[in-house]
Amino acid sequence: MWDTDVARFGIDIWMTTSAITQGFRICQSNLGVKIHDVKDPGQHLGPMFRQVLSALFSLMEHYESYWKKVEGSESLETFGFEGTLEPEPVHVTLDLLIELFMTGYQQFSPLWKDILSKESFDQVTETSQMDSSQFHIPTDTWVRILYELAATYHLWSVNRNKLLDMMTPLYFGQVASFVRRSWEMSSEEAEALVEEQARNLSLRRIIS
């Protein structure tokens, strides 16, 4: 395990998934604002995304019989600080994120067309034609894309790193879309968008 992507940026996902699937009692602790070395996603987070996604998809394979039986979600008991604090602003170069997505579309769109459903690819194509003031990827589309990429990863037994490289521009596009939607929001409001995505992921799994 320590020679895989789990040992790098995938450790949080691995610990959480292991605790859930092994039947441990789970709670969460509010420690206040996390202060760390903030990074612009367009400049620094591409390698991290690939490592996190590799760990996530590998865990999906390993625990497939477990998570396919799960329906819905429930809140965890929370300990610690009960208020809310706003962290320091994160500088995000929105134009760079969109440019990375556009470059990825030019390079990988023939492969995306083979991997994604027609509905997903058509939306990605539509997004590629938007300017920065309109740029967005609908939440439902991003959820569908994630499941389609996970299924492809499961079937793609050779050179999975190449597949992860092809996915990275889609991640940049999703981050740009999220940044645009949450630009004027508080952290609490932006967190609600993340919760919306999680609920849509769960709902689509049940429907599928």
Image (cartoon, rainbow, N blue to C red):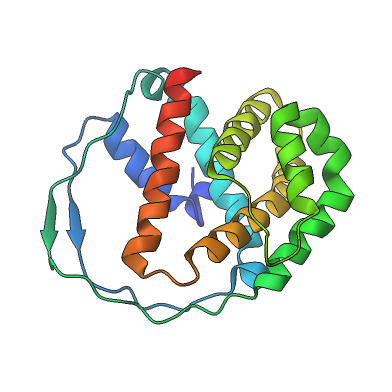
Outermost residue to the front: 134
Instruction: Classify residue 172 as left or right of residue 7.
Output: right
Q: Which of 25 and 8 lies nearest the eye of the viewer?
A: 25
Q: Number of callouts in the render?
A: 0
Instruction: Classify residue 130 as left or right of residue 30.
Output: right
Instruction: Classify residue 142 as left or right of residue 22.
Output: right
Whether residue 12 is visible here, answered yes or no, is no
Instruction: Classify residue 13 as left or right of residue 6.
Output: left
Q: Is residue 183 above or below residue 200?
A: below
Q: Is residue 86 above or below residue 48?
A: below
Q: Position of residue 16 (x, y in %)?
A: 33, 44
The residue positioned 71% from the left and 66% from the top of the image is 132
The residue positioned 37% from the left and 21% from the top of the image is 66
Q: Position of residue 76 (x, y in %)?
A: 18, 44
The residue positioned 40% from the left and 45% from the top of the image is 196
Q: Position of residue 143 (x, y in %)?
A: 54, 37
Q: Which of 133 and 198 lies nearest the eye of the viewer?
A: 133
Whether residue 40 is visible here, answered yes or no, is yes
Q: Which of 76 and 16 lies nearest the eye of the viewer?
A: 76
| Quadrant assignment, res 63 | top left
The residue positioned 42% from the left and 28% from the top of the image is 203
Q: Is residue 10 above or below residue 160?
A: below
Q: Is residue 178 above or below residue 16?
A: below
Q: Position of residue 3 (x, y in %)?
A: 55, 48
